[in-house]
Image (cartoon, grey):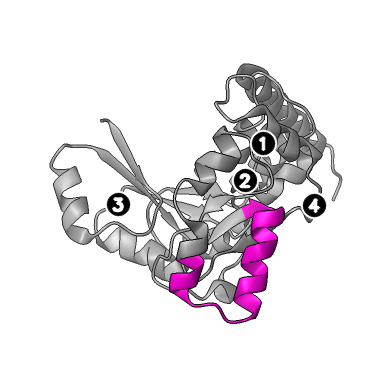
Amino acid sequence: PSIVSFHFGLPSSSLLSRVREWDTTILASATTIEEAEWLEANGADAVIAQGIEAGGHRGMFLSDDLTTQVETFLLLKQILDRVNLPVIAAGGIGTGRTMLAALALGADGVQIGSRFVATTESSAHENFKAQVIAAKDDATKLTLKQLIPVRLIWNKFLQEVEEMEKRGASKEELAEHLGRGRAKLGMFEGDIHEGEMEIGQIAGLINKIKPAGEIINEIVKDFELAREELSTIQF
């Protein structure tokens, strides 16, 4: 492959060395400055600065203390100040205006995931898409911190996990309750009560299912319009 992108935790230095032998461009997510610096030192070609707004699994990375993780734009600026690699912004980006904001802060590009869940081409179940469309600003929560943290839409399963964590359930208890195929159950089979529905906080801005091409065109138009509006600001 011409590009390999790592997201589910930091890859080992030995794995990065093996991939580099393919003359492949290596991207990898960082949720802290320390992770970004580690990636640079171990041969990544670009860093994806992923803020806490991002959906789906976060990965444990170098620390499992989620209270120390920051939102995308604050993380982005700090990583840009500390590494000499191209930096891609991810988490909470799904419009042309947020894309422009990321580039204005110095990002070399953006990574958009959640916005493309609610597309006609998406393999997600229609029930899950409907939940994304209905989501408001506070619809998601980062949970399963003892296992592998994941941002989900609130439902019966998430409520059960929260109750277990509050009473001090062990990692083993949580893993048993999670079981296997919980994400498939929610996102691809459409069980909106018992399944995992992984999505970012950007879900609050998604209000219609559209073709992916139409979404890309809207992002570009929104980006250009916002850039024109900024050019008229008088200082």
Residues at badges 3 and 4 in contact (C-beta under 8 Å)? no
Q: Is residue 109 above or below residue 106?
A: above
Identify the mark nearer the N-term, 4 or 2. Answer: 4
Q: Amino acid at mark 2?
A: Met
Helix, strand or loop for disc 4 = loop
The spot of residue 76 in percent (x, y) is 55, 58
Residues at badges 1 and 2 in contact (C-beta under 8 Å)? yes
Q: Is residue 59 above or below residue 96?
A: below
Identify the mark nearer the N-term, 1 or 3. Answer: 3
In this rendering, would 188 be left or right of 13?
right
Q: Which residue is mark 4?
A: 137
Q: Residue at x 51, y 76 (%)?
A: 65
Q: Residue at x 67, y 46 (%)?
A: 101
Tell me which segment is drawn in magenta.
152-175
- Marker disc for residue 44: 3
Q: Which residue is mark 1?
A: 128
Q: Out of 126 and 74, give the one closest to the viewer.
A: 126
Query: How far is disc 3 from disc 2 in space, using C-alphas?
Result: 31 Å
Local packing at callout 3 (Cα closer than 10 Å; few below 14, some 14-19, many 20+) is many
The spot of residue 108 in percent (x, y) is 49, 43
Q: Residue 131 occupies which quadrant of the picture? A: top right
Q: Residue at x 46, y 64 (%)?
A: 175
Q: Amino acid at mark 4?
A: Asp
Helix, strand or loop for disc 2 = loop
Local packing at callout 4 (Cα closer than 10 Å; few below 14, some 14-19, many 20+) is few
Helix, strand or loop for disc 3 = loop
Identify the mark nearer the N-term, 3 or 2. Answer: 3
Q: Which residue is mark 2?
A: 197
Identify the mark nearer the N-term, 4 or 1. Answer: 1
